Amino acid sequence: MLTIYINGTGCISAQETATGGPLLANLREYDQVKLATVDPDYKQWIDVKQIRRMSRVVKMGVGAANLSLQAAGITMPGAIITGTAYGCLDDTGVFLTKMVNQQEEMLTPTAFIQSTHNTVGGQIALLLGCNGYNNTFVHRGFSFENSLLDATMMLREGSAQHILAGGLDELTQHSYQILSRFGLYKKEPVKTLELLKSPTRGTIAGEGAAFFTLGTTPGENTVAALTGISTLYKPMWEGEVIGHIMKFLEDNACTPNDIDLLVTGRNGDIDQDDIYEEVVEALFPEHPEASFKHLCGEYPTAAGFGMWLANGILADQAVPDAAMFYGKAPRNIKKILLYNHHQGTHHSLILLSHVE
Amino acid sequence: MADLKKQIIEQLNLQEVTPESIGNDEPLFKEGLGLDSIDALELIVLLQQHYNIRIANPEQGPEIFYSIRSMAEFIVAQQTAKA
């Protein structure tokens, strides 16, 4: 089977991930429940006449996509595949609010045009002049994973040489209020570096964009291959998750012993982190473990940040202290398993291998 | 015309543009401010919202929206006709 290489990555998150340099060198620590992205100067990629119509999620998507392509040394991908659960929420809110306030009269076109889920993928294509395959997956907690899956299938069938794939979601005032009512977030501010030891329910809200330029041949800066990806929807019990991971590793010619580092999507919610404990105890009891949601917050496509972090760990062959959850990272990191779940319903596995 | 410029900047979210930097006779579309067809729709809504003016004949659009001055003259003419 063809190897899928990660030839470039780009990430915009609550950390300073758009500036390059050593992984998480300028760590941002927060003492709050809502994490917003650290925005780079988007005018480096987007003309001032076009940027005025773009909401934050569009800008962060375009920014992360450009960072990824620049890292890969690619100017024109063969396809653009995006994953987003919430889409362009802010513009949706603007449009719906105007509909109500103006009694469905005199509605302006900009917010409506920009409110669709595929706006980000479309804007990236327009700015690049890319006429290739362009698709957006809106599959809640699997949106990012399914964009990767689509990209790997296209690359393996030879439909494209380079594919830009990624995931993104934004946090708005509206979404934060609504999701808070569902009890997703903590009621009190929490220090992000203490989040994973929190004894209470709820987590911290986040947002971000992560894009990956994938190809079947490695580039000059390639450090990792996307060896496997799998999703599991609504497992009945933890045994089903454990069995799924065993099968996934077997399908990728691995055993738990071959995994040098486990990266988990722990988010500091005592109810949701239970499953990670069960999996670790059953399959990876002595494995070093890193986590990422205390750095970027919880959102449906947060696995994109996790994959960006895992790729960076393989590049540096070291885990930033702030990301380490248990144990000590080995000197030689060859395989990283990223296990994440969103809301206990959407479980995903991403296996990355180091490329020498 | 100063008020109209402010309203246009706000409605179109024009960045790095001040009312002083827009010439009264400068073309709004293509050259000049470089507005496009979506902006034209926004300007039609602006006239309705701020001045309660509806453009009855769409073919008049290029003439009305040529510049700040042409827009201002159209608004004054419509308001005078209503008075």
Image (cartoon, coloured by chain):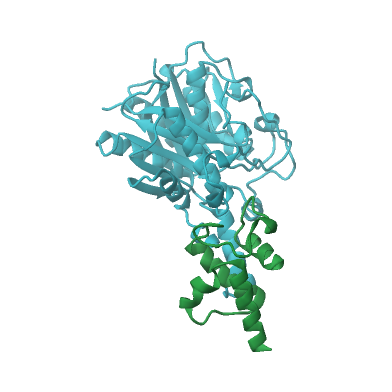
Chain colours: A cyan, B green
Question: Residue at left 34%, top 25%?
Answer: A250
Q: Residue furthest front?
A: B25
In the rendering, at what x and y percent does residue A46 appear?
A: 52, 44
Question: Quadrant of the rendered structure where residue A202 is?
Answer: top right
In the rendering, at what x and y percent does residue A340 appear?
A: 50, 35
In the rendering, at what x and y percent does residue A334 appear?
A: 43, 17
Of A118 and B74, nearer the camera is B74
Residue A163 vertical placement versus A250 (above, below): below
Question: Residue at left 63%, top 88%?
Answer: B81
**From this viewpoint, is residue A234 visible?**
no
Q: Residue furthest top?
A: A331
Judge left or right: residue A63 versus residue A295: left
Judge left or right: residue A306 versus residue A192: left
Of A334 and A45, nearer the camera is A45
Question: Residue at left 57%, top 75%?
Answer: A105
Q: How many marks?
A: 0
**Quadrant of the drawing holding the N terminus of chain A:** top left
In the rendering, at what x and y percent does residue A65 appear?
A: 47, 38
Of A157 and A71, nearer the camera is A71
**Quadrant of the drawing holding the C terminus of chain A:** top left
Question: Quadrant of the rendered structure where residue A326 is?
Answer: top right
Residue A169 vertical placement versus A110 (above, below): above
Of B75 and A190, nearer the camera is B75
**From this viewpoint, is residue B7 visible?**
yes
